Amino acid sequence: MKPAMETAAEENTEQSQEKKVITRPEMEIGRYHWMYKSSRPHQYHHVPALRGNISPLGNQGCFECCIKCLGGVPYASLVATILCFSGVALFCGCGHVALTGTVSILEQHFSTNTSDHALLSEVIQLMQYVIYGIASFFFLYGIILLAEGFYTTSAVKELHGEFKTTACGRCISGMFVFLTYVLGVAWLGVFGFSAVPVFMFYNIWSTCEVIKSLQTNMTASGDQICVDIRQYGIIPWNAVPGRACGPVLENICNTNEFYMSYHLFIVACAGAGATVMSLIHFLMILSSNWAYLKDASKMQAYQDIKAKEEQELQDIQSRSKEQLNSYT
């Protein structure tokens, strides 16, 4: 009697294990067949559950699409790109015009012989060509960094399909970090170099202000107050006249070329500083994105291993259930 009861208990246990959990769609299908028994049987397919706020027709609303698109915008990279473009544009545009005005001032007032400042003219012309190259390069580089920001933001937030990260993508992000660091150090040097002409023009301007104050107060004559450009090393010592004194120096300061060049050099220096700030901002963003990608790759590997183990466990359970059924 006891073995019979144990056999019945095992059969009941197997039947309870083999019962399926009835979902709501299956309940609705069963109710439909119960209400309309005479109708033709229909073939129903499994419909995956809808995720998120999606309309019954399966299409996302306009508001949800806009929120999703705005969520994928890398605002930090966008701000850094705008700052970089603005700084480079100010440095290149103002620096180019200011260098042209500087050459004109030297030729008219400090070095009348062309051979004395021929080397300086060639250097300034070369710097203007370099400015063209800098503007073109940073225009492309800023767009590339902005695109990389869009890619990383979309990947980290899993906005477009299944998230995947590769070793090549992480290597590219690391390369951008290194390149941005090098460019940031180089622009620090450019920022320091752009302050040199500002210092020179400031000395000339302050000397002119001293001459004006002496003439206003009538305390002394400003004829003995001079500015010697040769001491800055931009023209040789045998350049003629090489310096300007008194009223001549005051006339130089009153010219439109001096006024424009002085202020344009200040704006160019500020543009170089803005570019340095943008590159530092880019460096922080790229370092953060690289760390996110690295952590996400580890999480992805963990999820793949976990899914593989769960699949193996399900296979083992199904095989054991088949063996138990065949044994009973």
Image (cartoon, rainbow, N blue to C red):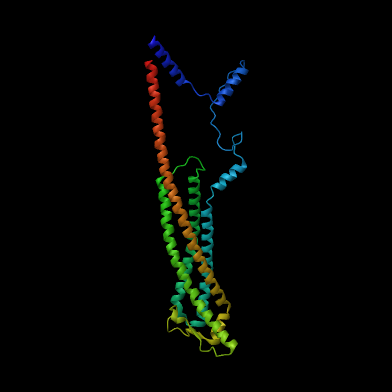
In the picture, residue 37 is in which quadrant?
top right
Q: Position of residue 145 (x, y in %)?
A: 48, 54
The front one of 19 and 12 is: 12
Quadrant where the image shows the N terminus: top left
27 lies left or right of 293:
right
Q: Is residue 130 above or below residue 31?
A: below
Q: Find the residue positioned furthest to the top.
A: 1
123 lies left or right of 64:
left
Report the residue at 55% width, 47% height from top: 71
Q: Is residue 21 above or below residue 145?
A: above
Report the residue at 38% width, 30% height from top: 312
196 lies left or right of 247:
left
Q: Is residue 238 above or below residue 130?
A: below
Q: Position of residue 247 (x, y in %)?
A: 56, 86
Q: Position of residue 78 (x, y in %)?
A: 53, 54
The front one of 249 and 207 is: 207
In the picture, residue 65 is in which quadrant?
top right
How many tags in the picture?
0
Q: Position of residue 133 (x, y in %)?
A: 47, 63
Whether residue 146 is visible, yes or no, is yes
The front one of 251 and 83 is: 83
Q: Is residue 51 above or below residue 156?
A: above
Quadrant where the image shows the C terminus: top left
Whether residue 115 is visible, yes or no, is no
Report the residue at 45% width, 48% height from top: 292
